[in-house]
Amino acid sequence: MFYQNTLKTKNYLFNILSFLLSVFFLMPLSAVEKSSSPDKAMLYIISPQDGDTVSSPVKVIFGLNGMGVAPAGIKMKNTGHHHLLIDLDQLPDINLPIPSDDHHKHFGKGQTEALIELDKGEHTLQLILGDHMHIPHEPPIISKKIRIKVN
C-alpha cells in the first residue's frame, strides 16, 4: 500500500513537471516581454570612426546616451549591454536573443570598449544594445554602421 501511494505521488509530480517544462520550452520567445528603451536613447561607436584605417587588434570604444550599461542577467530599467556586429549584411532578429559567434560579439560584463582581432581588409562594425536576456529593446537601440580598413 505504501509503495503504491509513493509511486502514484512520483507519477503525479513527474506529470506536473513534464507539463511545466513543455509549457516553458514550447512558449515562443516572442511572447517574452521585451525591455523598453527611452525615445532619445542613442548608441554609437566613438572609435574607430567611419572610414578610418587601423591596425589589428582594433580598439573599439562604445558610446551610449540616454541609457545606462548593466551586465547581462541584471534586469534594471533603461539599461543594457553592448553587442558588436562585425561584417553583417543585415541585423539579427530583434525579437530573439542576439547570437554569439564571430560576427556577433557579446560584452555581457558591461564592457564599454574592446580589442578585436580583425583580418586585413575592409570591415563593417555596428553596435546593438541587448537587455538582461540579450534581446534588443523596444524600440531597438542600434548604432550607425561604420566601415574601416585594417592594414
Image (spheres, rainbow, N blue to C red):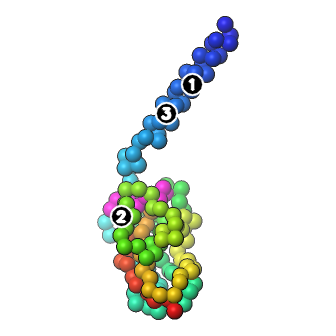
Number of the label disc, if any, that sits on residue 20: 3
- Residue 39 is situated, as x and y percent measured from the top left of the image, at 31, 66
Q: Please report the residue visible at 42 percent of the width from the left and 80 percent of the height from the top.
A: 124
- Residue 64 is situated, as x and y percent measured from the top left of the image, at 43, 73
Residue farthest to the top? Answer: 1
Q: CA distance from mark 3 to mark 1?
A: 11 Å
- Quadrant of the snapshot with the N terminus: top right
Sooner in the amino-acid sequence: mark 1 or mark 2: 1
Number of the label disc, if any, that sits on residue 140: 2
Q: Nearer the viewer, mark 1 or mark 2?
A: 1
Mark 3–mark 1 CB contact (< 8 Å): no
Q: CA distance from mark 1 to mark 2?
A: 41 Å
Q: Is residue 137 magenta?
A: yes
Residue farthest to the right? Answer: 2
Q: Is the residue 150 above or below the residue 117 in the image?
A: below
The residue tagged with tag 1: helix, strand or loop? Answer: helix
Sooner in the amino-acid sequence: mark 3 or mark 1: 1
Three-letter amino acid code of the residue under disc 3: Leu
Q: On the image, numbered disc 1 is attached to which residue?
A: 13
Q: CA distance from mark 2 to mark 3?
A: 31 Å
- Residue 55 is situated, as x and y percent measured from the top left of the image, at 54, 90
Number of the label disc, if any, that sits on residue 67: none
Tell me which secondary structure the magenta stretch mostly adopts: loop
Three-letter amino acid code of the residue under disc 2: Pro
Three-letter amino acid code of the residue under disc 1: Leu
Q: Is the residue 68 above or below the residue 49 in the image?
A: above
The residue tagged with tag 3: helix, strand or loop? Answer: helix
Label 2: few (<14), some (14–19) or many (≥20) C-alpha neighbours in 10 Å: many
| Magenta stretch bounds | 131-140
Specify whether 8 is left or right of 52.
Answer: right
Q: Is residue 108 magenta?
A: no
Q: Quadrant of residue 41?
A: bottom left
